[in-house]
Image (cartoon, helix red, strand yellow):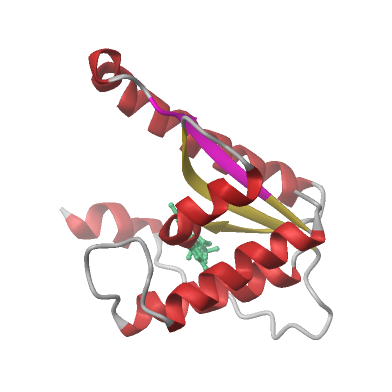
Amino acid sequence: MQNHTVRNSVSAAMLHALEAQQLETSHELTKAEASSVYHSARAIEQAPVLVLVYSPLRSSQSGGSYALSDLQSSGACMQNMALAAHSLGISSLWICDVTYVAQRINELVDVRNHQLVAAMALGYTSPDADGYVAPRRSLTNSFLGSM
Ligand SMILES: Cc1cc2nc3c(=O)[nH]c(=O)nc-3n(C[C@H](O)[C@H](O)[C@H](O)COP(=O)(O)O)c2cc1C
């Protein structure tokens, strides 16, 4: 989505729902979750491109058997986009926080019978960015350490 107005509306909807505590969730957000929504909204505002990933809404008869594969397909789609962007020197941010305002986004882009799974913001990192990279655990700690 390169439509500046829609992207700004998505971002504004997230910030407004956060402020008014009207996010589509049954639990109260932790400080970290609220901070993530705020920063995701800001990233959406600043990135030149936002890709919204939708999955079909299945009927109750067929839904169960497809739900898991739909989820895996969406995850693979997101991962492939991130890898393809990286190979082209484009930065990406995987954003699930958009699901907190899924109904509003569906209205904005006029999508029905589909479920918003996630969004991918794409753009070029500013030369002024601090270049923060989250600390990495070694593979040994990630796999063997947890056994
Ligand atoms: C399933 C999934 C959902 C994510 N949702 C968000 C999000 O809503 N907001 C956000 O800022 N980052 C989100 N991220 C990005 C992560 O916070 C993290 O920055 C990203 O996975 C890059 O990891 P790295 O720090 O190891 O490079 C998400 C990542 C994944 C895999």
Q: Is residue 54 magenta?
A: yes
In the picture shown, does residue 127 fall above or below 1?
Answer: below
In the picture shown, does residue 53 fall above or below 29?
Answer: above
Residue at x-position 62% and y-position 41%: 110
Q: Quadrant of residue 34?
A: bottom left
Instruction: State the image coordinates of residue 80 (x, y, percent, origin top left).
Output: 61, 38
- Residue 106 seen: yes
In the picture shown, does residue 141 fall above or below 112?
Answer: below
The secondary structure that most of the magenta stretch takes on is strand
Magenta-colored span: 51-57
Residue at x-position 57% and y-position 37%: 111
Q: Quadrant of residue 46?
A: bottom right
**Direction from residue 93 to residue 88 in the image, left or right:** right
- Residue 96 seen: no
Residue farthest along the top direction in this orientation: 62
Instruction: State the image coordinates of residue 68 (x, y, percent, origin top left).
Output: 31, 28
Instruction: State the image coordinates of residue 56 (x, y, percent, origin top left).
Output: 46, 27
